[in-house]
Structure formats: C-alpha cells, structure tokens
C-alpha cells in the first residue's frame, strides 16, 4: 500500500481505478452510445433502466428493480468487507437516463434525427446518457480497486428516472434510500459557466416546484338550465355546449402568463415553465372537452418565493375551472428544497479532479467540431472548443464569478433535483465539461442540435466520461481510506442542518406520478408512439 500521508489515499488503489477506466474506455463508450440511442423520456425509461440493472448484476451488485414504487428506478448495493468483519463506509452515486421530448438528434455533424424516428422524438440534451455512464465508470473502477487492494466499504448506486421532472430523488429520499450513507457524489456534465470542471461551493441549486392541474367537465349537461322540452338528450349540435376543460386550461394558461410579472420581483433568476399533457381527445364534435391537464414548473432561489408562485397558480386554477364549468384537481410532481453545501467533500472532490485534469479533445474531436462549423457556414479553426472546456477552475473562484451575476441576498441559483440528496447525507456536486464550441463571430448562439450531437459523438463525449469517472473513483477511494474526512463531512452536515432546519416539503407517503400521460414512444405504457 502506498499512502498519501496528507489525505490517507491509497495511491496504488487510485492508479488501479484509473487504469481500469482507461482499459475499459471502448466498452464505456459503447455503453454510452446505447443509452444515448435509447433516449427515453421521463418516467418511461424502461429499456435504459433494464440495461443498468442487467449490467450492475453482472458486476456482482444486488439490485432492487422498481425501487420506491417507480418502475424505471433501481437501487444497487455491493459490499466488500475485505476480511475485516465490518462493512466500512457507505458511499453513493447515481445514474440519470431520461431524455427530452422534441430533441431527437443523430450523432452526426448536421441536423438530422436518429434513423427511423421523428425529429419530435426524445433526445439527450444535457446529456444524461453521459451522466449515468460517467458515474457507472467511477463506481465500477472503485469496485475493482477495492477488490484488488482489499479495501472495505459499501457502494450504493441508484437509478434516478425523470430528472427533468425532479422526479425520483424526492421519492427515494422519503422512502429511506439515502439513509445510512456517509457521502454522496453528484455529477452533471457542465451546463453553464463558470461551473465547468469544478465543484459547487456555497451557491447550490434552489427550490423547484412542479404541479399538474387537471380540469374535468363531467356534468356538461348542467351548463344550461333547460333543453328542448321534447328531447331528453342534451346533445343537439345546435345547442350551446359547456365551455369544457380546454377552456379552463387555456384560461388558466393565459391568466397565469399575463400576471407572471406580478408573481415575483424581476430578480433572483426565477423562472416559470409549462407543458400541456395530452390524452388523445381529438374531435370535431359539438361536445365539450372532458379533461385537460397543464403542468406548471417553477424554479426559485428559496422556498418563500416558490410558495408565493404556488398561491397565485392555485388561485388561478380555481377560478379558471369555475369560469369553464369544470372541477379542478391538482397533483404534485415535485417539490424540492434548496441544496446544502459541504465544503469538506468539495475540497476532496476537486483535489481528485485536479489530479485527473480537464478533458482534452484530440485531433478526431477537432475534425468533428470543424465539420459542424462547416455545416453552419464557418471556416475551420485550430481550437474549435470553448476554452473553458479544457480548463479547471477552483470552486472558490467559480463561486466568486457566479456571485457576480446574483443579488447579494440570493443564496441559490437555478435548480436540479440533487438538492434533495443534500438533506439526507453529506453531498458534493461537481461538473466536468461536456463538449461545447467557441462562438462563431456574428452568428450568435448555436442551434440546439449542435450541443445535442456533440453529446452523442464518441470522440467528443468520451473525454467527459473518462474525466468524470476517474474523479469519482479517486474521491471514493480517498473517502474509503479516511474515516477522519468522513467524520468532518458529517460534522459539517449536522451543523448546517441544525442551523437551518428544512423538513421535506412533501408527505412521507408521496408517490411518483408515473400514471399521468407523459410522452412515451416505447409501447410499454400504452401512451403515444413517436
């Protein structure tokens, strides 16, 4: 054993883990392409989840399928007691694998959907495909090093569907899947500067609320006091019909959008988005629409702001329903708390990221990037990738730059559902660059297909997987070898929790909304095929 006396890290074990990733990079790349091609949307990631379950079992993990009542979630565990008679620390990371409807893009250098699918089918945008394979690489490399070097500990790995809905982590948390964990490592390919090749420091993601309002017109015949006295059937095509559920939905939509500027001050980086859920009710008959659903989701820096938006939307829903002769039911999709930081884990993680170094793009990646530039009418350049993609930035410096864009009172910015994990165990959130191109002078932002395509082309996305996987493995091995660090991280977690208690925002028996008509093209759920 070769120990780093400053950290307790077994340097030989880290070298073993890093070598495992290098040796398996072709396989990891193929795995990523598989998940990227599946591109299944939220709550409908049937084949993606099944692939992870099968793969984890092949590596000796015990896997619970459909964890916490979510068909496309899982929870996997592997323990190495190393002959010590004890299980050692418990460390957790996770996979995400949901894609986004309407963003189908092939792994090519021109805008084109994947073969056999509409351009409106889902595609990986962040990409969560790389998120999951990166953490899986780190997990399996750690397992290999633990076995090779006799390191005791337990690895836990959860499959987290529907991240785009903030879907599974709040449910897993409420059901105890993060209990008893000593440290959690949360990874995401970078999505905004300056958070590129770094760890979050103080400014974690904020609150996220999401609700579906369902309007039902189940007593349309009571809209009028009387009908033709000679007919008991209130269905004449010439009769006035009740406004119906579509009228309620559009009334709520237009009213809520019209008063959006009045919901909250125009500071703090908050946002409101919406989606209409379809049940296949297309008709030209003179019948009122029976049911209509609209989802509103909002991101705010804190819970107080989120609650104010909630009050406005709830009030609008009640009045829209009354105007359209409907009833309304509301249903939570997500209700996430702002995140807690952990400086101890951020230091450990960044130390290991610095050891690995930022991603580097080779000649093939440069050629591909220049082919994309050519598609957009731009000349080739020597270094087409955004400079920050190949640079590290210390967490404290990233924090300083991030704060330049925020009001002094604001403590959180944007949203991601990893925040729920931070309330159950010490957690670090880190980013590794995904491939992004330098701006083309005078061209403005790149079309969305460019980032999506770069996330699916092996030569451009593999550096992300390699760097993130090695960083996670090194971090896990350092924590496994240092009970003192884990104790410090736990003490910081306990202190922050005591200083600012923040209980869960949903009831303990909250169930994931898997039964709603979310987009589906797999055929499993009985809903829409793309």
Image: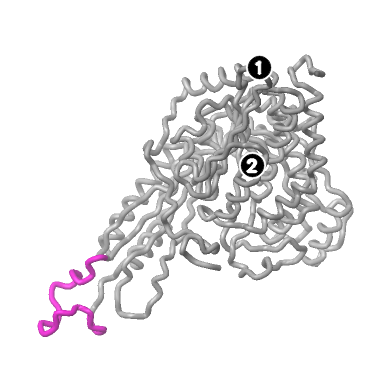
Label 2: which residue?
A: 56
Q: Residues within 10 Å of mark 1 (few under 14, many from 20)?
A: few
Find residue 287 and report its horizontal and vertical position in percent: 30, 76
- Cα distance, mark 2 to mark 1? 25 Å
Identify the residue under disc 1: 84
Task: Tell me the element at label 2.
Answer: helix
Q: Residue at x 71, y 50 (%)?
A: 31
Q: Residue 175 bears which disc, if any?
A: none
- 363 vs 241, nearest the viewer: 363
| Quarter of the picture holding the C terminus | bottom right
Residue 70 located left or right of residue 394 = left
Residue 159 vertical placement versus 88 (above, below): below
User: Is residue 401 shown left or right of residue 265?
Assistant: right
**Which region shows up in magenta?**
218-239
| Residue nearest the observer in this picture, 55 or 276 | 55
Name the residue rendered at 25%, 75% in the picture.
241
Please state which of residues 67 and 235 is positioned toward the viewer in this rendering: 67
Q: Where does the image place residue 462, in percent across and percent down from the top left? A: 77, 48
Give the vertical position of 240 relative to 347 (above or below): below
């Amino acid at each position: 054993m070769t120990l780093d006396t400053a950290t307790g890290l077994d340097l030989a074990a880290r070298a073993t883990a890093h070598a495992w990733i290098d040796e398996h990079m072709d396989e990891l790349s193929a795995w990523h392409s598989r998940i990227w091609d599946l591109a299944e949307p939220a709550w409908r990631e049937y084949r993606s989840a099944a692939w992870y379950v099968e793969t984890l079992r092949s590596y000796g993990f015990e896997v619970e399928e459909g964890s916490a009542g979510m068909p496309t979630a899982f929870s996997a565990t592997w323990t190495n007691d190393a002959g010590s008679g004890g299980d050692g620390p418990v460390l957790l990371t996770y996979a995400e694998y949901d894609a986004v409807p309407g963003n189908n893009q092939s792994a090519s250098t021109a805008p084109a959907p994947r073969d056999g699918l509409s351009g409106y089918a889902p595609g990986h945008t962040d990409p969560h495909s790389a998120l999951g394979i990166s953490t899986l690489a780190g997990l399996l490399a750690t397992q290999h090093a633990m076995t090779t070097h006799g390191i005791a500990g337990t690895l836990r790995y959860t499959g987290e569907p529907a991240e785009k809905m903030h879907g599974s982590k709040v449910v897993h948390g409420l059901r105890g899947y993060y209990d008893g964990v000593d440290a959690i490592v949360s990874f995401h390919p970078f999505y905004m500067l300056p958070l590129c090749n770094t760890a979050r420091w103080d400014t974690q993601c904020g609150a996220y609320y999401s609700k579906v309002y369902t309007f039902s017109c189940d007593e349309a015949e009571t809209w009028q006091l009387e009908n033709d006295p000679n007919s008991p059937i209130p269905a004449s095509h010439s009769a006035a019909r009740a406004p119906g559920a579509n009228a309620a939905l559009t009334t709520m939509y237009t009213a809520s959008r019209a008063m959006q500027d009045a919901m909250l001050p125009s500071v703090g980086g908050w946002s409101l988005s919406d989606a209409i859920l379809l049940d296949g009710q297309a008709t030209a008959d003179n019948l009122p629409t029976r049911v209509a659903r609209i989802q509103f989701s909002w991101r705010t820096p804190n819970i107080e702001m989120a609650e104010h938006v909630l009050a406005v939307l709830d009030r609008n829903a009640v009045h829209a329903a009354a105007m359209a002769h409907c009833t309304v039911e509301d249903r939570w999709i997500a209700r996430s708390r702002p995140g807690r930081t952990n400086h101890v884990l951020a230091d450990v993680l960044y130390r290991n990221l610095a050891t690995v170094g930022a991603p580097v793009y080779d000649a093939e990646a440069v050629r591909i990037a220049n082919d994309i530039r050519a598609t957009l009418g731009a000349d080739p350049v020597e270094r087409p990738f955004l400079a920050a993609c190949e640079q590290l930035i210390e967490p404290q410096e990233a924090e300083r730059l991030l704060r330049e864009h925020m009001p002094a009172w604001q403590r959180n910015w944007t949203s991601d559902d990893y925040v729920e994990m931070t309330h159950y165990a010490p957690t670090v959130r880190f980013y590794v660059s995904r491939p992004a191109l330098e701006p083309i002078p005078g061209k403005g932002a790149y079309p969305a297909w460019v980032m999506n395509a770069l996330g699916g082309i092996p030569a451009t996305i593999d550096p992300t997987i390699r760097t993130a996987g090695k960083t996670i493995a090194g971090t896990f091995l350092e924590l496994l070898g240092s009970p003192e660090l884990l104790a410090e991280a736990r003490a910081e977690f306990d202190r922050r929790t005591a200083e600012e208690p923040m209980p869960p925002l949903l009831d303990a028996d909250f169930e994931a909304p898997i039964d709603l008509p979310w987009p589906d093209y797999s055929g499993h759920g009985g809903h829409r095929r793309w």
